Amino acid sequence: MTAERWQLLPPLTDEEYASLTADIAAQGVLVPVVLDAASGEVIEGHHRLRAWTELRAEGVRVPEYPKQMLRFQSDDDRVSFVLAANLFRRHLTKEQRAEVVTRLRAKGWSLRRIGEAVGVEEITVRRDLEGATFVAPERIEGADRKTYPARRPRSTIFVSSPRDAARAAKALQALGDDASGLIGLTRAEERVRMANLSRMRVEAAARPSEHSGETWELRTGDFREVLADLAEQSVDAVVTDPPYDNEGVPLYEPLGTFCLRVLKPGRLAVVYAGNLQLDREMSLLERGGLTYMWHGVNVLAGRHTRVRVRMVFGQHRSVLLYSAGPYRPRTWLNDVTFAEGRGGPEERPLHPWQQALEPVRHWVRQVSEPGELIVDPFLGSGTTAVAAVMEGRRFIGCDIDPGCVETTRRRLLAFLIEEAPTHGQQPDGDAS
Ligand SMILES: C[S@@+](CC[C@H](N)C(=O)[O-])C[C@H]1O[C@@H](n2cnc3c(N)ncnc32)[C@H](O)[C@@H]1O
């Protein structure tokens, strides 16, 4: 049996996990990790422990984490403890609560018992389960501890609305036999993306590591190596979105150095940046040699990111504008863009960090002219590559992950095949 069996709540999102890690790096683990005195198993605090372990492995000097040993009478006791601890600390969205409710139902709990544990009325539990698809147990156990046959149909992903049902059906179809067990929709879509990326890695292995079209070129590998041959002062603009988790942030310094070398004097690097460590990202770009010019924001319509450790509902991405040497303005710039759609995970089908396309096109248009050369050292799913080609710019990009390069190649080819007649003829106006 694994410790994960006590992880009853939906996992943190990448961003939430990154912020938890940053917080632990700064302050250490503040809330004790709870261990079962009998077995030594982690009962509560998996995320804190994982972040702490990863930081230590990276050589970050975080103090020993506090532990609390507790004795439990039964597994029910453990479940109740995990729920109480987490529901108190986390403010669940309706969707997340419904996921917890569904997990407990799948464990065989009755509606009343679930309601008591989660702290909602039985009617709310019923509503959470309504329209849900989930793996139903053969029998359920009531508050009286007697078991009864379950009446729910068997399926895999929990959903709570017709819109989500369509997404779930798509995810299930893509996952095929891998869709075993009960998973939430967000996790299912994440698994689809990861499965696609690994498929792309396998397919990329069968191809040469460089791909190119008439006006674009993709390379596989670390940007410090595979873009080392770009001539000094040969690039008109860098438009990029580096990873901004703990591993990614240190890359801002070599990115700054790279941009300073390849950019034409006074031209811009447009760098998406995470808000949690914005100060560090900016000082690293400057340490790399770039000059601060401005910053813009990309407003996320509809949804927000909840950064629990700071208790902030984040509704924008920061976009940093740095120049190679003193900035030489060529045109007026607009510094706000609005992401199309609602920014939900279903709008990131190709990469967990896939950015909305329109804002990237906006930045490409603003910082370059048709025919000029744009570079992106961190392709991901190739949003900048597609934006650049759509806007009639030349493009060179790379990614360390061959799956990302292959995804980008396909995305570019799909665009070129479908949009060939209008390619390069987009109006050069402002989309924001
Ligand atoms: C935030 S993602 C880019 C997402 C992209 N903007 C999109 O819309 O899909 C950052 C990418 O950088 C890649 N990466 C990380 N370290 C790298 C390195 N040293 N050199 C090149 N690529 C790297 C990762 O594999 C990841 O795909």
Image: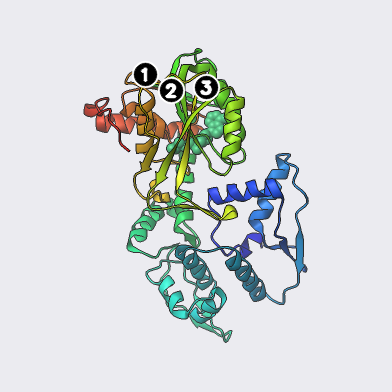
Among the two numbered marks 2 and 3 on one chain, the one whose residue lies closer to the N terminus: 2
Q: Which residue is mark 3?
A: 259
- The quarter of the image holding the N terminus is bottom right
Among the two numbered marks 3 and 1 on one chain, the one whose residue lies closer to the N terminus: 3
Q: Which residue is mark 1?
A: 372
Mark 3 burial class by Cα count in 10 Å: few <14, some 14-19, many 20+: many
* Kind of residue sitting beneath label 3: Cys
- The quarter of the image holding the C terminus is top left
Q: Which secondary structure lies at badge 2?
A: strand
- Residue 419, numbered circle: none
The residue lying at 72 percent from left, 41 percent from top is: 60
Q: Is residue 98 above or below residue 304?
A: below
* Kind of residue sitting beneath label 1: Glu
In the rendering, at what x and y percent does residue 336 appear? Answer: 39, 38
Q: Which secondary structure lies at badge 1?
A: loop
Regarding residue 212, the answer to whether it shows in the image is: no
Q: Is residue 185 above or below residue 390?
A: below
Q: Is residue 257 above or below residue 318?
A: above
Tags 1 and 2 in contact by the CB under 8 Å rule? Answer: yes
Report whether 366 appears left or right of 150.
left
What is the distance, in whole Å, between disc 1 and disc 2 at their CAs? 8 Å
Residue 249 occupies quadrant: top right
Q: Which residue is mark 2?
A: 237
In the rendering, at what x and y percent does residue 156 appear? Answer: 44, 62
